[in-house]
Image (cartoon, helix red, strand yellow):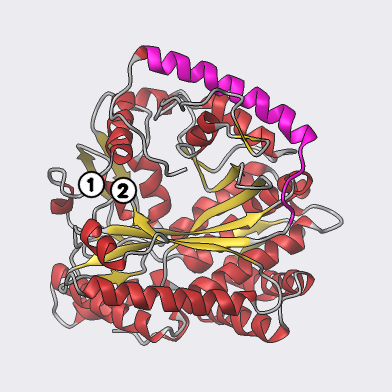
Amino acid sequence: MGAEVTSRTFSRAQRTAYRQRLLENLDHFAHYLSTAQFADTASIGLELELNLTNRDFSPALRNKAVLERIADPAFQTEIGAFNIEMNHPAMAVGQFGLKELEDSLRMQLNRADERAAQEAADIMMVGILPTLTPRFMDGWDWLSSGQRYAALNTSVLQARGEDVFLDLAGPEPLSFYAQNIAPEAACTSVQLHLEVSPDQFAPAWNAAQMIAAPQVALAANSPIFMEHLLWHETRIELFKQAIDTRPPEMRTQGVRPRVWFGERWITSIFDLFEENVRYFPALLPELSENGADATALGAPLLSELRLHNGTVYRWNRPIYDPGSGTPNLRLENRVLPAGPSVLDVVANAAFYYGLVEYLRTADRPLWSRVAFKTASDNFLNCARHGLEASVYWPGIGEIPVAELILRHLVPQAAEGLRELKVDSSLIDRYLSVVAERARTEQNGAAWQIATLRRLEGTGLQRPAALRELSRLYWENMHTNAAVHSWPLG
């Protein structure tokens, strides 16, 4: 879905031809879903977006040089020149899979950090780098090389017909116009992948949508943007606004944003791809060299449908992958910010995989007892307030989200992990991290907010306090201690 394109701009003829090919792809996909065999190994995967910083913790706009040092195809560019992304290969979650994931992440990140140091850069796992200032959006130094990123920037601005207006609420509200989509580069996340069979995709997606609110509350780690305290997980609203193709009039009319929670529970993965084609114009309308019915070892490539799907930014995104053998369907969970530590990242993954397994196999689906809008409202409330939020939960009513996690969701996630045959010692290891974070209500966002206030209380001005906050964050991150145990600065 991050495939390169060959052009930064597209003609009307290209857009017309692409639309026709996209509709043909959708028809092929509908037929193929009803007849094909898909992989059913329930494997998991992970993508981790990272920030590069200078020694003063300002953004280091050198991802090309750092990636050349790392020299590992698992590490790739992201849209920002101070971002890189690590792709972890698929693996089994059962038995000791989660510990293998933790060990592998630590080993790869330690190696990447050593190579980045050769370019005088450090790696930070955080939802939004606290030291970003408006200067990083000046000119084009912020943008990674490659046609795809430039084409995406051009297409978003052309669709809007004007600069990008950001209007962010919070304790210290922030509003300004951006001349490009550079603010999108500020948002770095963890993306969890789960291979799902066609018949199980709908319950898995519905379950993931249901738990997105407690997920984001638990893991919130993006409270600061452009030196302002905003939402606990500002990344959620910032990403939506930074890449919004709608001018104000279209927003007023209720046109759907490309960064989208959705609007209904689904019955099939096809529902999501059909909505993508029906609701969203193409941003990167580049035709593949192959026709709509091109195949790889019997599976249709559906190149246009897959490219288009990569430019509709659902928080739980469907993925069709023709693969090199048996095709597979995956659910990509995009809710979580990066960091704070590797242990926290894997604990968040354990909570997600266990809870999705528990809910999707329940006799009475949880989502059948609640309106979809309630799940959406829960999600936004938890992004605003993190572990200080309250949510509405079926069978319980209004409840503080920290209490919901501790009393109800952690035991359910444990049961789901047992069904996935995860070793009992690992269930205890990772879910105890989740439980303690909920009990103390100290996630990455809470730690950053409290630390910033303490530092400013010593007389430091905001820029100096944010540099010191970032230094303390970086030191704690390298201990691999869970964030609930981090001392305040």
Q: Is residue 32 magenta?
A: yes
Q: Which mark is residue 79?
A: 2
Q: Is residue 17 above or below residue 222?
A: above
Q: Position of 194 compared to 155: left or right?
A: right
Q: Which residues are magenta?
A: 13-40
Q: x%, y% of residue 56?
A: 15, 73
Q: Observer-nearest residue: 393 or 183?
A: 183
Q: Which mark is residue 143?
A: 1
Residue 298 visible to the viewer: yes
Residue beneath the point at 71% across and 78% down: 95
Dominant SS in magenta? helix
Residue 341 visible to the viewer: no
Element type at mark 1: loop
Residue beneath the point at 37% across and 30% down: 245
The total of numbered circles placed on residues is: 2
Q: x%, y% of residue 102?
A: 52, 77
Quarter residue 262 falls in: top right
Q: x%, y% of residue 57?
A: 20, 70
Element type at mark 2: loop
Q: Position of 394 compared to 303: left or right?
A: right
Q: Is residue 177 magenta?
A: no
Q: Residues within 10 Å of mark 1 (few under 14, many from 20)?
A: many
Residue beneath the point at 65% across and 47% down: 325
Q: Of the residues shown, which amino acid type is indicated by label 2?
A: Ile
Distance between the alpha carbons at the discs numbered 1 and 2:
6 Å
Q: Position of 467 compared to 248: left or right?
A: left
Q: Observer-nearest residue: 371 or 410?
A: 410
